[in-house]
Every structure is written in C-alpha cells, then in structure tokens.
Image: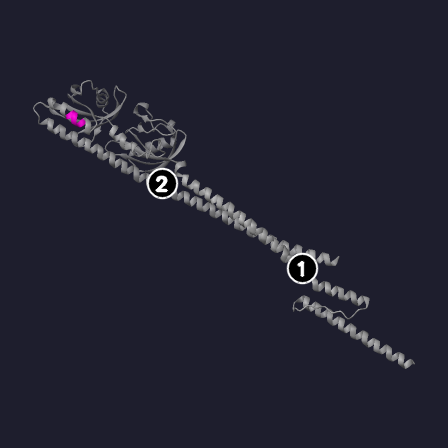
Amino acid sequence: MFKKSIRTKIVAYTFSIMLIVSVLFSIISLYNLFSLKSFFINSSKNVFESQANHYLEDEVESYARIIEANLNIKEKMCASTVNFLLNAKDPIKYIPNIYTVTSRDLNIKGIAMLDKNFSIIYSYPKGATFEGAINQIKAGEYKRFSNNDYFVDFYLEKDKNAYFSFLFPFKDEGYILFEIDPSGIFSILQSAQIRPMSDKYLWMTDHKGVLVFDPKVKEHPLITLKDHVDLTDPQNGEKLAQLMTNYILKGKTGTSSYTFRGVEKYVGYTSIPKTGWGLGLTLPTNSLMEGVTRLNKQINSKTILMLGIFSFFSVITILIALFFSMWASNKIVKPILDATNTINSIIMGDVSKRITYESNDELGELVKSVNNLMDALAQTLANLGDITLKKESEDD
C-alpha cells in the first residue's frame, strides 16, 4: 500500500505541476498569437486605408486639373472667336462656318447672338433651342469665368439633355452665347473607370450639388442632371449631404467615406473653382478591403496550422511530463522501498542485506543511515553470539 501510494502521489504532484505550467504557457502563447494577429490585420487595414485615401485624393485632383484645362481651352477658343466677330463688319455671316469648326473641336451645340435683354437676335444651327440657357441667365444663375466672359452652369434644354454655356459681351450691349455639349467632359469622367461597371468611378455635380454625371455601376444605372439627384439632400445619405455641403461645395479637397444607395464607399473629393463643380472619385469599402480580406484569410489558415502544431507539441510535452514524473517517482521511491525491504529483513532476522544508492542528497543520507543501522545491528548480534558461546563454555 505504501509503495503504490507514494509513487502515485509523486507522479500526480509532478505531473500536475508540469501540466499547470504547460497550460499557463499555452494560454500566454495563444494570447500573444491572437494579439499579434489582430495587430497585424489592423495595421494592414490602416495602411491600406491610408494608401487608398492618398491615392484617391491625388487622382481626383488630377482629373480636376484635366477638366479645368479642357474648360480653359474651350473658353479661350470661344474668346478668340468673339474677338474675330467684334472686328467683322457682318459677324452673322461667319457664324455658320465658325460653328462647323467649333462643333467638332469644342463640342459646341449652338451659337446665339442676344440683345441686351437676352432675347435671341440670331442663332445657329436652325432649330437649336437656347431656352434653358436664357432662363438661367435671366434668373441670374451665371458667374464670371474670366475678365471677358461669364459661365452658365448646367441646365436642361428641351431635348432633356444637359448643357453649359459661355456668355460673352458683344456689340451694342448685346451678347454672344456658346452652348456646349458636355460629352467631352463626360468622356474624361468615364475614363476613371478601368472597365465598364468598374467599382472605382468618378462622379460630378453642378455648383448646387446636383449630380450631373454618375456612371452606370452595379448598384445604380447612369445618373444625369435630368434625374435630379441632389447630394445635399439627407435622403441620399446624411454623411454624404454633410460632405457635399460643408466640404466639396466650399472648395475643399480631401478624403472621406459615405453610404450611397446601400453601399459604403471611400471617396477622394475636390472641386473646380471656376465652375463650382464637385468631383468625387469613389471606391466601395469592400473593394478597398479586398486585399485585407485575402490577407486575413491567409493569416487565419496559418493560425489554424500554428494551433495544430502547437497542440501537437503540447500533447508531446504532456506525455514527456508524464514519463518524466514516472521516472522521477521511480528514482525517488526505489531507495525508500529498498530501505523498507531491508527493515523487513531485520524483522525476519536477516541482517545481511544492504541498500545500494550512490548520492549525497537526502535519500543518500537515509540509505547510509539504514546501512549503518544494519552494520551496527549485525555487529551487536555477532557480539551476542560470541558472549553466548563463551558463557556456554564456562558452564561446561
């Protein structure tokens, strides 16, 4: 009973201590592993967001400069045309030829000569309507573009298409109006999409925040001025409305995020000062985080592999701990059992046995004491035998 009990206790105590240490080490290691995983993913996400925001801001500014340069070219060529007509004795006869050239190169939709009350004196081509432009002008909805002319922002004509115009002062307090088809501008906007229906695209508003061009994407069809989608309206997204009102329409440049028609997006935004147009280069959050998502999946798979390897080595460690505890118990218990057997031999009358254990530890001292006891006892018994024999001899 003693043999079984002490060995069991030693094994249990040793194994328990090593198991507790192993479990604590495992918990600390797992905590560090998941902490590093979370830190790495969050750091990667922040890097992706920072790079994307910088990229979106730089790119939208580039498109703004391209559009502004395009407008400046159109305005300069229109101004040169007006200067030529001012020096002509009969400017009307030159307008058809001017239209033929400018309609192709500048996307001019029509040219009109107006009196001081903005009524049409002459227009070309025949059948062209300028009601949208004239209504805007009479309502005071125009702004100075340069020292020599004015800019009339987007409006709808009878054909339900959007146009903008340059208005130049002319002879006899009159004006010359160049109505421009924005298809060239829209082509620049469309080029932001790498492919049709691409996630990254460029939209534009007029100076009031109404969408003029928002290309066809997965979540919505092409949006133009006739759809009258006002981005300053909170119904189209409160965050987007605040972004338009407080930043874009105030001429600021930067990056932000918003939700439009159920899709969360990052946007690089800016504006074109001379026209007040707002530009936004957007990329859905899911597309932006696609790289982070892939990285997260890779990290998860590696984490599962590491957990498997860690579990395997934990099992090996536990088995080693069990083997070591059994070996240690045998190492400790064997001298004690030998001492017990020796003492039992004394009880049975055999004083010739000795315990073999070479060590200077506590068990070594115990073994030495038991062996000394056996030597002393054997010597005592021998002396008693000699005394007995001597006594018997004297009696004879």
Q: Residue 5 is drawn in which quadrant? A: bottom right
- Mark 2 or mark 1, which has the lower sequence index? 2
Name the residue rendered at 34%, 38% in the picture: 255
Instruction: Point out residue 159 in the picture as x, y percentages from the top left corner.
Output: 26, 20
Q: Residue 384 is drawn in which quadrant? A: bottom right
Q: Amino acid at mark 2?
A: Ala
The N terminus appears in which quarter of the rendering?
A: bottom right
Is residue 1 left or right of 202 when viewed as pictured?
right
Residue 355 part of the magenta segment: no
Q: Amino acid at mark 1?
A: Ser
Mark seen at residue 52 = 2
The C terminus appears in which quarter of the rendering?
A: bottom right
Is residue 80 left or right of 54 when viewed as pictured?
left
Residue that numbered label 1 is attached to: 329
Residue at the extreme top: 127
Please tell me whether mark 1 sits on a helix, a strand or a loop: helix
The magenta span reads: 98-102
